[in-house]
Image (cartoon, helix red, strand yellow):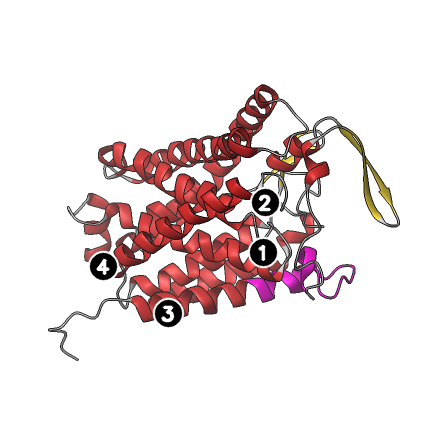
Amino acid sequence: MRARFWIGFLVVALAVAGGLSYFASSDPDGLDTVALNGCTVTETTAGEQLDGTCIAQNAGEHHTAGSPLADYSVFGGDGTVGLAGVIGVLVTLVLAGGLFWLLRSRTPNRRE
Amino acid sequence: MVTAMHMSDGLVNAPTALLFGAIAVVGLAFCLMRARADLDERTAPMAGLVTAFVFAVQMINFPILPGASGHLLGGALVAILVGPYVGAVCIAIVLLVQALLFADGGLTALGTNVTNMALIGVFTGYGVALLLRRLARRGKGGLVATAFVAAFVNTVVASLGFVLQYAAGGAGGASLGTVFALMVGLHALIGIGEGVITAATVGAVAAVRPDLVYLLRGTAPALVRKEASA
């Protein structure tokens, strides 16, 4: 019964990252919308070109833009968002689960 | 396509990035110290799963207006499920993974992003949930309503964090008034989505494992008693 809940929770997270992510909106989010306000965005071969005046023009190239998982893809491949998401869920689970497991307080009078 | 969704490098100047970097480090160190007391063999795996779940759900941008989307921040969600101290660490881990592996959220902007989402968002969500705790402990409907309201408020208040940082050392490109109005307006819409996702998630966990809902800890509410006898 206990295990069923944990497995169920993980399956939901994997399904969201690995499947539902294909249906995510690709429009800019709230913060990006504000940052892009005042600019028109043109997609060019060299990336996005911003014309006008907006906050996003100050944004720097990302330091980890060369990461194999950059922009939620696997090596930039089309249609790999689901795989990237699954990897992300598992990495996050191991990192967070490991940290929290190490941090947990051990009750001194526990009987096993 | 999943788009980048957090602050990039360069939107605020270096002193501001450093200041909020320091605030993030101090805040997270405090949370890590306090988190210990909230973690045991039952809640540690829960906190790991909640972190992975937030990573997953943050990938899902939902439309709010033509040409604009929003995504979960997760502050109230983690605060209600695993408590504010563990919760802040959960969100910080998500932001770290996104910045390091997925090129989402600048490395020099990590301090501002952690301050806004992991500290402001989580503690605002928790504060609202605490204010409504009597309602939350009255039953399923009360808990779900509490989760919705806490999540809505956490989204709007977290967005004010960016306005504050822009006011302190924004790189320019828009007036502070415009940034304030747009941030609050858009995040009020995103907050509705955040509220729905948070309410659904908290409701689902409480339906099967109310003992794992941090907000329901302590005084035995009807929800937990029902579980114990089942």
The subunit letter for the residue under badge 4 reads: B
Residue B31 placement, left or right of A97: left
Residue B88 placement, left or right of B98: left
**CA–CA distance between discs 4 and 1?**
29 Å
The subunit letter for the residue under badge 1 reads: B
Q: Are marks 4 and 3 on the same chain?
A: no
Element assignment for label 2: loop
Residue span colored magenta: A69-88
Check residue B37 in the rendering and tell me which mark sits there, or answer none: 4
Is residue A74 in the magenta section? yes
- The answer to whether marks 1 and 2 mark residues whose Cβ atoms lie closer than 8 Å is yes
Local crowd at mark 2 within 10 Å, few (<14), some, or many (≥20)?
many
The subunit letter for the residue under badge 2 reads: B
Check residue B99 in the rendering and tell me which mark sits there, or answer none: 1
Check residue A3 in the rendering and tell me which mark sits there, or answer none: 3
Local crowd at mark 3 within 10 Å, few (<14), some, or many (≥20)?
few
Quadrant location, the C terminus of chain B: bottom left
Q: Nearer the viewer, mark 4 or mark 3?
A: 4
**CA–CA distance between discs 2 and 4?**
31 Å
Q: Nearer the viewer, mark 2 or mark 3?
A: 2
- The answer to whether marks 1 and 3 mark residues whose Cβ atoms lie closer than 8 Å is no
The subunit letter for the residue under badge 3 reads: A
Element assignment for label 4: helix
Image vertical order of residue A67 relative to residue B136, above or below:
below
Res A82 → quadrant: bottom right
Image vertical order of residue A86 relative to residue A49, above or below:
below
Q: Are marks 1 and 3 on the same chain?
A: no
